[in-house]
Amino acid sequence: MTKPKIHTVFSPDRPLDKEYAQPFIDAFGQSSVEEADYIFAAGGDGTTLYSLGLYLASTCIPVVSGTPPNSNSVGYRTDHGIYTPEDLEQRLIDPKLITLIPLEAEVTFSNGRKETVHAFNDVSVLRSSRHAACIDLTKIFKDKDDQSFRLKGDGMIISTGMGSTGLNRSHRGQTLDIDDKRIILNGMGIYDPERQSLFNPFGFRPTIESADTIFHAQFAYADKENGRPVRVDYDTGSFERDEDGIPVTSIKVKASSEKSVDIVKKKEEGLPIHPFPI
């Protein structure tokens, strides 16, 4: 078997990751992203996310990830059985690939300027002042009636299956397998003004939506003086105001119809579907 061409990604400021990555670079060399057969993410889930971003900018190179044996990283989405170059070579014999479809978020500022970003984990909206966020949310379903309602509270999360173990899970959202294409809608401290109480003891009740659902969120009063500004976070960045101080006023989020990535399925893939009561 010919040795695969590998581009290894790691955090150079983390000694454990650097020490873990070096034997793989010694064994396989360090191919350029353009020439590599695989991108090897040597670290935790954050390194995997960064590597998936490299994939989007490359010519469709599959990503395989591993976590150092002595790491304290949880690494839900990384393979905890790749410790040596030989382990990696074995994993790449007839690997099973999972296609990931990122979320596509179109962010609109109050002056009408738009910016589009992609997220493999989630897109979240967080209040950025002492005032609760006021979000007018419309869910647009293919061949079904739209649903609109107001969310008032700390914010909301729109998550993929891959991202369901992150911020969504910490807010008691349902965990999905990495290859589940559905989208999770979750809330953070959402208040129900009609009943003068939280929807349930854990806040907004998370829902699992069809993969073709489009979410359009308008942020009421976000552009007003002493209003209700919000911050939009995604995998590798955030928006609150642009460089001219113009605030974000809305987002539109959907599964991307043009971009996808392949990731090598880890040996022990499979997660509990209900880690928390919902």
Image: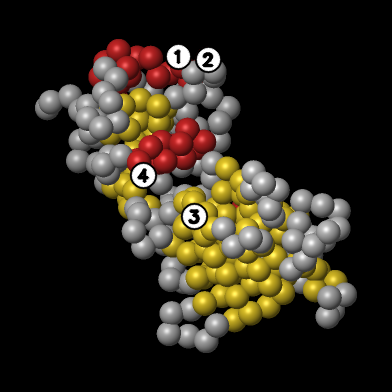
Q: Are marks 1 and 2 in contact (CB under 8 Å)?
A: yes
- Name the residue beneath numbered marker 3: 116
- Residue 89, by quadrant, is top left
Residue visible at 52% across and 36% down in the picture: 46
Q: Relative to residue 264, is residue 27 depicted above or below? A: above
Q: For numbered disc 1, what is the local secondary structure?
A: helix
Q: Which residue is mark 4?
A: 56
Q: Are marks 1 and 4 in contact (CB under 8 Å)?
A: no
- Quadrant containing the C terminus in the rendered view: bottom right
Query: From the viewer's perspective, is residue 140 above or below residue 97?
Result: below
Q: Where is mark 2, residue-wise?
A: 15
Q: Amino acid at mark 3?
A: Thr
State the residue in front, 1 or 115.
115
Query: The residue tagged with tag 4: helix, strand or loop?
Result: helix
Amino acid type at circle 1 is Glu
Q: Is residue 22 above or below residue 213?
A: above
